[in-house]
Image: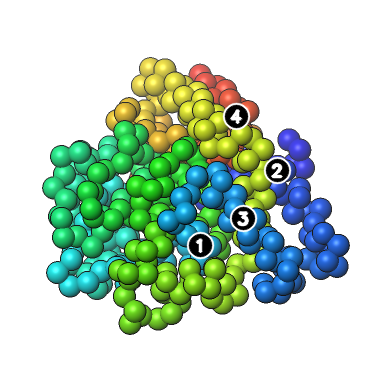
Amino acid sequence: MKYGRVFNFSAGPATMPEPALERMRDELLNYKNTGMSVMEMSHRSKPYDAILSHAEGRVRELMKVPASHAILFLQGGATHQFAMAPYNFYTEGHPIDFIHTGAWTEKAIKEAKRIAKLNIVASSEDKNFTYIPDYANAKFNSDAAYLHICSNNTIFGTKYNKGFPNSGKVPMIADMSSEILSRPIDVSKFHLLYAGAQKNLGPSGVCLAIIHKDWAESAARKDIAEFWSYRAHIKEGSRLNTPAAFGIYACGLVLDWLHEMGGVEKMQKVNQEKAAILYNAIDGSGGYYACPVVKEWRSDMNVVWRVKNDEALEDKFVKEAQSKGLDGLKGHRSVGGIRASIYNAFPIDGVKALVDFMKDFQKKNG
Ligand SMILES: *Cc1c(COP(=O)(O)O)cnc(C)c1O
């Protein structure tokens, strides 16, 4: 592999596109004849103005973000959004609706609970989060402050594959950390969506948030710290304080790559192709490998499976794979097993190499 790199299946921080990394390398010491690195540059300077507006413009173009919505680059990751959303939008008498689909909604619920009343309107906890619960018939509360969903469940390997809930007049918020820009999304359906960058967008330290401007202006509380206020971040154009400047620059380069690859429609096709190769190998192994996720709800980004329900064998699988340059396949500590995260930037050759390894491993350890 070029540069001695491995196939990195890590769930996040995750593989980034090589062309983006190469541009970072080439521009590291002297960015476009400014005589300095982006890391050393004032975030109020002209070159940085251009970097920020370029990244923002790319998000708007690739996700077809309507003019009603602002694009923000924040800090604190998705975890910070778990708190920021309720602090902005919860008011008494308006509980928050949650669809509970795994570890990440669990965390969002825990944060909201500190200050808010909430309702779990649908949950897949009964079957260890191996499916997306029936949201079409869920009873949403018409007076809810908002509905929170997680569109792709990184740890359990599930994804909303049949559209998104219709929450009526109630604003919908989505945590899209592990699938942002992996498929076309109708942004206008969401009042807020966000994603920590380190899965599909760039390095850690940046969190993309896309928010309905009028909602932030009219509905968000004013008696909170300025740093928590969406309104304040919109007003300051993602520069309320010193932003994660280099990270935002890096996101811009990843977005350039995505643009050159043909955008999210094209990316979705490639992602589906990659996921199908892997799921077919699992399902075609005669039960040696088994994916616990109900077929219709499987994620294209995070593929989870067990090896004969045998932890010792799974340990061996992960170690041997690693020695062959297939890195980061250990399942999340809360569920065990194997997990392959195959985000946008993960190359199809890596998926094929993994499938070859799986066949070989089964032959030797069947
Ligand atoms: C990784 C992840 C998070 C946590 O992101 P941080 O940036 O570490 O806060 C939240 N939600 C989902 C769905 C994730 O995949």
Q: Earlier in the sequence, mark 4 or mark 1?
A: 1
The structure's colour scheme is rainbow
Q: Tell me the quarter of the image containing the N terminus.
A: top right
Q: For this rendering, which residue is in front, 76 or 351? A: 76
Residue visible at 80% across and 57% down?
27
Disc 4: which residue: 348
Q: Earlier in the sequence, mark 4 or mark 3?
A: 3
Disc 3: which residue: 55
Q: Earlier in the sequence, mark 2 or mark 1?
A: 2
Residue 346 at x, y percent in the picture: 59, 38
Q: Amino acid at mark 4?
A: Ile
Distance from Cα at disc 2 to Cα at disc 4: 14 Å
* 314 in relation to 125, above or below: above
Q: Mark 3 touching mark 2, by CB under 8 A?
A: no
Residue visible at 22% across and 72% down?
91
Q: Mark 2 touching mark 4, by CB under 8 A?
A: no
Distance from Cα at disc 4 to Cα at disc 3: 26 Å
Mark 2: which secondary structure?
helix
Tag of residue 210: none
Q: Earlier in the sequence, mark 3 or mark 2?
A: 2
Disc 1: which residue: 72
Residue visible at 60% across and 29% down?
348
Q: Amino acid at mark 3?
A: Ala
Disc 2: which residue: 18
Q: Amino acid at mark 1?
A: Leu
Mark 3: which secondary structure?
helix
Q: Tell me the quarter of the image containing the C terminus.
A: top left
